[in-house]
Amino acid sequence: MQSGVFESSRGTVAARWVVTDREGGYSQPPYSSLNLASHVGDAPLAVAANRSVLASALDVPSDRLVFPGLIHSSDVGIVDAPIGLFPNVDVLVTSTRNIGLVTMGADCVPLLAVDPEAKVALVAHIGWRGAGDGIVETILTSLVNAGATVKRTQFILGPSICGECYHVDEERRQHVLNVLPGAGRRDAQGLDLRDGIAAEVRAAHAAVKTIGGCTAEDPLLFSHRRDGVTGRQAAAVVLV
């Protein structure tokens, strides 16, 4: 697990962030051990305990975590209360303090974004379908609509599958590359969504950094493509 803060230009902390891996939780194989997802077949009590670990690391109560529905869409949920689950969206945005926004993945890209001056936070779950449907542009537009300025927004991209490990059929590949050409630079048959997203964020003149490596290559990370039945790691942020 890694954690840190988003700071304003004055050096004040605007938000805290956490990016998890497999370690430090209560789930049993094949979900061992810090699985944060309730929809993968893991024991509900173990997931609840793991979410308490995440909440503690983010320094918010467990009942103030909000999760997106994760349906591989490009739809956005505006969060102004700790509702627990925001169904049917893959992007959450808030300007409300002390609500932990959480996104999950096991190969897809988890994205965090904060404008520390405007106090706007966003999380997103980005797979090939959302990427090809223009979710990065949706994210940038959602930030602006919420009062953020893209150029001063700070982005974090969590662990995801790399282009060498993520080979797809040519139709799917072209669907993504039409929108994110930078996703195809590593491998002639593969897609590296994180590379493509990072390139688009930099093209918008915003700062972006990556946390963690390839999910398929690192045994300390959950990977659906590698393992099939498995858990989900998380990336989370809270405005302070």
Image: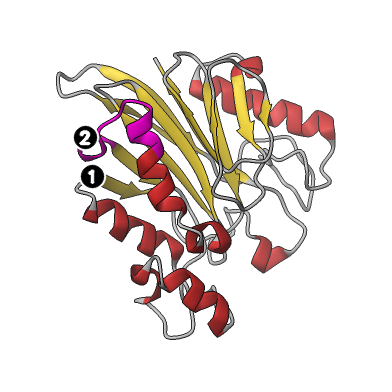
Report the side of 93 relative to 119 (left or right). right
Q: Give the range drawn in magenta.
A: 142-153
Q: How many numbered badges does the structure rendering display?
A: 2
Q: Name the residue under label 2.
A: 152
Q: Are marks 1 and 2 in contact (CB under 8 Å)?
A: yes
Q: Is residue 144 above or below residue 133?
A: above
Q: Name the residue under label 1.
A: 206
Report the side of 192 relative to 200 (left or right). right
Q: Which of marks 2 and 1 precedes in the sequence?
A: 2
Q: How far apart are marks 1 and 2 (CA)?
A: 6 Å
The x and y percentages for residue 62 are 64, 18
Q: Residue at x 37, y 41 (%)?
A: 141
Quarter occupied by the C terminus: top left
Where is residue 149, by image quadrant?
A: top left
Report the side of 126 relative to 227 (left or right). left
Using the image as rendered, state which of residue 92 and residue 190 is in the foreground: 92
